[in-house]
Image (spheres, grey):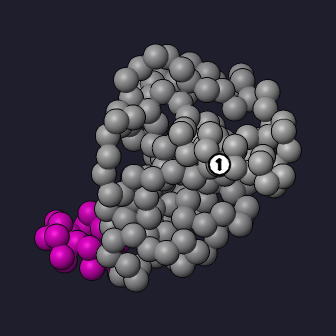
């Protein structure tokens, strides 16, 4: 959030964004929509249901990672995706919106507080809702290089305290109109 405020201020000072625009973390709903790349939520991943195809779309727990860290067989994809740990952005295929690394590489913070029941309670009634239940955890999406394929699916959700730091946790930002 601090980075988003800093970037907004910098971009406004250099006239790169309008006064009515700001950078922010995506809401959980925005993140999932972007991840799915236009698919209607019927597939596990933006490209289909086969977790082995992640080797083309993202950096996930792969065969090389499993060998190095002696992970039980079956937890990772069966081939190497080219990187054991983080990969440079854009090394894999983008989704249908042209977005890279939506599956894997690093978990991404979302604006929302974590609520395990938020999807069932919202039932699609609100556009880009923000869950601000005052909880002590925030939502993280997308999985990472250390996540098994199912942790990288479009609907996969994780939670961490905002104070938590780990090497496979990052963020992406969205540019939006100030409401």
Side of 17 relative to 161 (left or right): right
- Residue 77 drawn in magenta: yes
Side of 130 relative to 21 (left or right): left
Quarter of the image for residue 91 reads: bottom right
Q: Name the residue under label 1.
A: 7
Answer yes or no: is residue 174 visible: no
Image position, residue 83 (x, y; %): 38, 78
Looking at the image, residue 47 lies above or below residue 133: below
The furthest residue to the left: 70
Side of 70 relative to 40 (left or right): left
User: Which span of residues is magenta-colored?
Assistant: 62-79
In the image, what residue occupies the spot 55% across and 59% down? 102
The C terminus is located in which quarter?
Answer: top right
In the image, what residue occupies the spot 73% across and 47% down? 175
Side of 51 relative to 102 (left or right): left
Looking at the image, residue 80 lies above or below residue 154: below
Answer yes or no: is residue 121 visible: yes
Image position, residue 140 (x, y; %): 45, 43
Of residues 176 and 29, the one drawn nearer to the viewer in this rendering: 176
Image position, residue 72 (x, y; %): 16, 66
- Label 1, secondary structure: give it: helix
In the image, what residue occupies the spot 32% across and 57% down? 167
In the image, what residue occupies the spot 44% across and 74% down? 87
All told, the count of numbered labels is: 1
């Amino acid at each position: 959030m601090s980075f988003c405020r800093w970037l907004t201020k910098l971009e406004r000072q250099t006239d790169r964004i309008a006064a009515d625009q700001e950078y922010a973390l995506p809401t959980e709903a925005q993140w999932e929509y972007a991840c799915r790349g236009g698919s209607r939520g019927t597939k596990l991943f933006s490209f289909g249901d086969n977790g082995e195809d992640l080797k083309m779309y993202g950096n996930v727990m792969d065969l090389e990672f499993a060998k190095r860290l002696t992970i039980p067989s079956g937890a990772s994809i069966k081939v190497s995706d080219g990187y054991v740990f983080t990969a440079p952005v854009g090394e894999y295929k983008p989704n249908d919106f042209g977005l890279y690394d939506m599956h894997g590489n690093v978990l991404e913070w979302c604006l929302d507080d974590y609520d395990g029941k938020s999807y069932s309670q919202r039932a699609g009634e609100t556009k880009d809702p923000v869950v601000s239940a005052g909880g002590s955890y925030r939502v993280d999406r997308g999985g990472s290089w250390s996540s098994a394929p199912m942790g990288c699916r479009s609907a996969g959700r994780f939670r961490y305290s905002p104070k938590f730091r780990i090497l496979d946790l990052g963020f992406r930002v969205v540019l939006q109109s100030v409401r």
